[in-house]
Amino acid sequence: MSNLEQKKFPIGQFQQPEYISDADISDYINVIEDFPKRIKKVVEGWSDEQLDTPYREGGWTVRQLVNHLADSHINSFTRFKLALTEDNPTIKPYDEAKWAELPDSLSMPIKPALRMLKGTHQRWAALLKQIFHEQFSRTFHHPEQNADYDLRNCLAMYVWHCNHHFAHIDNLKTEKGW
């Protein structure tokens, strides 16, 4: 793996598990529940200069990553709720790269995004702890990929997403000695 590839995918690309047990689901819920604390701790006290540092050449800044996490995870939480309340709903895709270029992602303080993550993840984890095993088989349809995704696999992907972007930021912190 090249250095650029390692920086893009520090924990590797997402690999859909062949089987996801109830114990895996429980572990995934713990990651969802704990993620806002982990991300806040890693960026706490960073200066604007640090937040405006790209995690890799040509990559998003830390500020954009934190805002992306808030945007992405609130969209995912919404997709979970849609799948739980409708039969295979078609979700609304969004262009995450364009969202990351909007002024709020580029220049706002990260505190509002961290608060959004905290609230979204508290509600998401509470929901996940209360739904029945069978409900993790509920699906939503992604029109751009023309595919249906069940909540069990989607949860695995979002745990990867948490860890993927956390690694971007944590690796930059280590690399820069912050």
Image: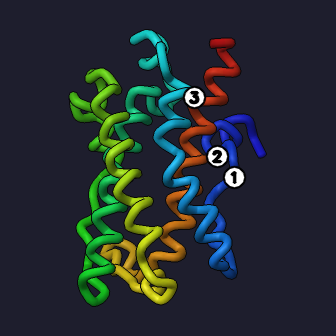
What crowding class fits label 3: few (fewer than 14 Cα within 10 Å), some (14-19), or many (20 or more)? Answer: some
Q: Which mark is residue 12?
A: 1
- What residue do we see at 36% from left, 61% from top? 76
- What residue do we see at 39% from left, 12% from top? 48
Query: In x, y percent, where is residue 122?
Result: 39, 51
Q: Which mark is residue 117?
A: none
Which quarter of the figure has residue 84?
bottom left
Label 3 to label 2, Cα distance in Å? 11 Å
Which quarter of the figure has residue 81?
bottom left
- What residue do we see at 68% from left, 12% from top? 177
- What residue do we see at 43% from left, 35% from top? 65
* Residue 7 vs residue 158, the one in the foreground: 158
Badge nearest the viewer, 1 or 3: 1
Instruction: Give whichever of discs 3 and 2 has the lower sequence position.
Output: 2
Is disc 3 placed on a helix, strand or loop?
Answer: loop
Q: Circle 2 sits on which residue?
A: 9
What is the three-letter code of the residue carrying label 3?
Answer: Arg
Which quarter of the figure has residue 170?
top right
Q: Height in image: 152 above or below 9? A: below
Is disc 2 placed on a helix, strand or loop?
Answer: loop
Instruction: Give whichever of discs 1 and 3 has the lower sequence position.
Output: 1
**Tags 2 and 1 touching, CB below 8 Å:** yes
Is disc 1 placed on a helix, strand or loop?
Answer: loop
Query: In x, y percent, where is residue 144?
Result: 33, 72
Q: Circle 3 sits on which residue?
A: 56
Label 2 to label 1, Cα distance in Å? 5 Å
What is the three-letter code of the residue carrying label 1?
Answer: Gly
Image quadrant holding the C terminus, namely top right
**Tags 1 and 3 touching, CB below 8 Å:** no
What is the three-letter code of the residue carrying label 2?
Answer: Phe
Q: Height in image: 17 above or below 76? A: below
